[in-house]
């Protein structure tokens, strides 16, 4: 009985599992239709132009709103324009690069134009106006939104509670013309909340440190380039964004299928001929025209001058003569004094150091420092010293420190761990500027040669301008775990030195430089045979093929 009952239970379980499996397959087909089904649906929608236009508008409007929402979230207080009439903009390409939005496609799966699609926000008297423009393959629209700083805003700025945004079609596809604008209604927010129309109060919202310095657009101020968006850029970007090449102006030229007249404006071919192509006055040389004599220079002369300049007596018949000379080969022995020497290369480089000092800002009476120079370096000279973060190249110093070419030869490396972890921001806030220094005095220099390099040691003293350091409210000490609260003391040395090569070269001793002459290892004489021709007197003859002599190539009629 137990075994029969057990078999009946197993059969029922199998039947239930089959039913569940069939239902599961049906659900998959219903939830995830096949590619053919999707294509058929797409053809049905596309076939109905009205339905297709509705679908196209819905996708375009959703993409436009996505750009608007991304712009509202990006333009916080620090990124808003400051003065009435000022505006800032950002292309769709820049929004994608900043990860504010993903790439946008139209209803056909084509990428929309990332350069002609953009957002632009402008400050007006009592609000901000946001313009969102989207340009796709078959349609270009823009959306205008009015923004302000209201008590109900979740972000720094938001839309007015009863605002509506209008999309205007500027490039509809096909033969369909959209006569009326598409209006997107905004949800009405609680109107009992008091609206603050003073948009300048938006700039007082708590969003970290407030930028106190002025914003410049396309200007060069205090050694910095400001781009079209007010941010600091390099000189190349400044030239690209702000310096526009003037349109070329052509005068009396035919360029790219257009005629330019004498005033630089575009004219027709007849006017071009009249203004620019002038018929030259006829010039006569040694001619008698219209009762006037013209001389050899084209000017009008009298008959006597005309006879003298233009009417020449016939010359007598001349005979052609040929010039010849004798030619003899000679050979001489020439001795040249040769030298074998070590080449010398003149080298110069900047060496950076980043000393530290505590908050007491005491003058450093003696600061030992060393730099590693190539093997064979000689005639080392410390040409000049610069100090302060204005002339200090932080990235170059990091590269040299990583290569181990600079170090402090009397201090434990662990004391200077702050050198290795310094960042650009930390350097800007905690490094002394030129105004904080009184002077840097070199006490002693010394070169020590090792098997693979030369160590050049510099002992120097640093004098600080304490009052400038204490009253500088933008200068902060940095707390290092090893040395405590410190300032960075950036100093740069400019060295010149000669590097003597380990491989010799040979050339005539007379061509050696003064430095090369100091490294001569061998002198010897090198002999060579030089051949040359000696020429005898010249003579003229009527014979064109005279043997035993050399023809010079000269002839004369006599």
Image (cartoon, grey):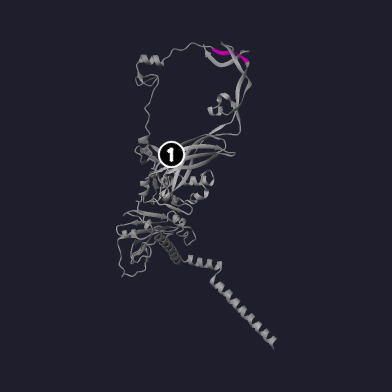
Please state if 440 lies on the left or on the right of 527 as rendered: left
Residue 201, x across and y down, in percent: 32, 60
Front in this rendered view, residue 253 or 446 = 446
Q: Say whether residue 243 is visible.
A: no
The quarter holding residue 293 reads top left
Residue 244, x across and y down, in percent: 39, 45
Question: Does 324 appear in magenta?
Answer: yes
Residue 162, x across and y down, in percent: 33, 67
* SS assignment at label 1: strand
Front in this rendered view, residue 221 or 352 = 352
On-image quarter of the N terminus: bottom right
Query: Which residue is labeled 1 in the image?
Result: 441
Question: Does 167 appear in magenta?
Answer: no
- Classify 10 Å Cα crowding around label 1: few (below 14), some (14-19), many (20 and above): some
Front in this rendered view, residue 553 or 338 = 338
Residue 371, x across and y down, in percent: 52, 41
Identify the magenta region: 320-329
Q: Main secondary structure of the magenta part?
A: strand
Q: Say whether residue 417 is visible.
A: yes
């Amino acid at each position: 009985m137990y075994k029969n009952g057990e078999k009946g239970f197993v059969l029922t379980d199998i039947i239930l599992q089959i039913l569940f499996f069939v239902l599961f397959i049906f659900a998959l087909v219903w939830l995830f239709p096949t590619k053919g089904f999707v294509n058929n649906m797409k053809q049905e929608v596309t076939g109905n132009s009205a339905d297709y236009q509705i679908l196209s508008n819905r996708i375009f409007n959703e993409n436009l709103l996505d750009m608007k929402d991304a712009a509202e979230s990006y333009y916080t207080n620090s990124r808003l324009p400051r003065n009435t009439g000022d505006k800032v903009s950002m292309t769709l390409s820049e929004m994608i690069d900043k990860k504010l939005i993903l790439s946008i496609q139209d209803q056909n799966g084509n990428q929309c134009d990332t350069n002609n699609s953009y957002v632009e926000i402008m400050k007006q008297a009592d609000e901000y106006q946001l313009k969102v423009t989207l340009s796709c393959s078959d349609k270009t629209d823009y959306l205008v939104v009015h923004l302000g700083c209201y008590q109900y805003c979740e972000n720094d700025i938001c839309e007015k509670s009863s605002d509506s945004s209008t999309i205007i079609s500027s490039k509809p596809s096909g033969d369909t013309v959209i006569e009326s604008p598409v209006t997107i209604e905004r949800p009405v927010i609680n109107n009992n909340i008091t609206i603050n129309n003073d948009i300048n109060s938006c700039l007082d919202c708590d969003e970290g440190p407030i930028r106190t310095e002025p914003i410049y657009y396309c200007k060069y101020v205090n050694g910095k380039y400001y781009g079209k968006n007010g941010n600091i850029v390099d000189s190349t970007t400044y030239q690209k964004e702000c310096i526009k090449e003037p349109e070329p102006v052509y005068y009396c030229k035919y360029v790219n299928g257009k005629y330019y007249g004498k005033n630089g404006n575009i004219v027709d071919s007849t006017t071009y001929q009249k203004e620019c192509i002038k018929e030259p006055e006829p010039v006569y040389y040694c001619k008698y025209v219209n009762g006037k004599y013209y001389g050899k220079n084209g000017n009008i002369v009298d008959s006597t001058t005309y006879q003298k300049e233009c009417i020449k007596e016939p010359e007598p018949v001349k005979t052609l003569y040929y010039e010849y000379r004798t030619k003899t080969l000679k050979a001489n022995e020439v001795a040249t004094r040769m030298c074998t020497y070590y080449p010398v290369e003149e080298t110069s480089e900047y060496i950076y150091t980043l000393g530290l000092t505590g908050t007491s800002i005491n003058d450093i009476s003696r600061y030992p420092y060393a730099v590693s120079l190539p093997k064979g370096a000689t005639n080392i000279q410390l040409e000049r010293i610069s100090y302060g973060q204005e002339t200090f190249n932080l990235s170059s110093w990091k590269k040299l420190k990583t290569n181990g070419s600079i170090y402090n030869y009397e201090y434990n490396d662990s004391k200077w761990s702050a050198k290795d972890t310094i960042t650009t921001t930390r350097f800007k806030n905690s490094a002394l500027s030129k105004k904080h220094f009184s002077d840097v005095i070199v006490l002693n220099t010394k070169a020590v040669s090792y098997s693979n390099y030369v160590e050049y040691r510099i002992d120097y003293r640093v004098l600080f301008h304490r009052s400038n350091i204490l009253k500088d409210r933008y200068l902060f000490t940095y707390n290092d775990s090893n040395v405590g609260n410190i300032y960075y003391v950036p100093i740069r040395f400019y060295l010149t030195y000669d590097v003597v090569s380990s491989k010799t070269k040979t050339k005539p001793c007379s061509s050696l430089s003064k430095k090369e002459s100091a490294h001569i290892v061998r002198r010897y004489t090198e002999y060579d045979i030089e051949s040359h021709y000696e020429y005898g007197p010249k003579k003229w003859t009527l014979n064109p093929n005279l043997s035993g002599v050399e023809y010079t190539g000269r002839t004369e009629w006599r």
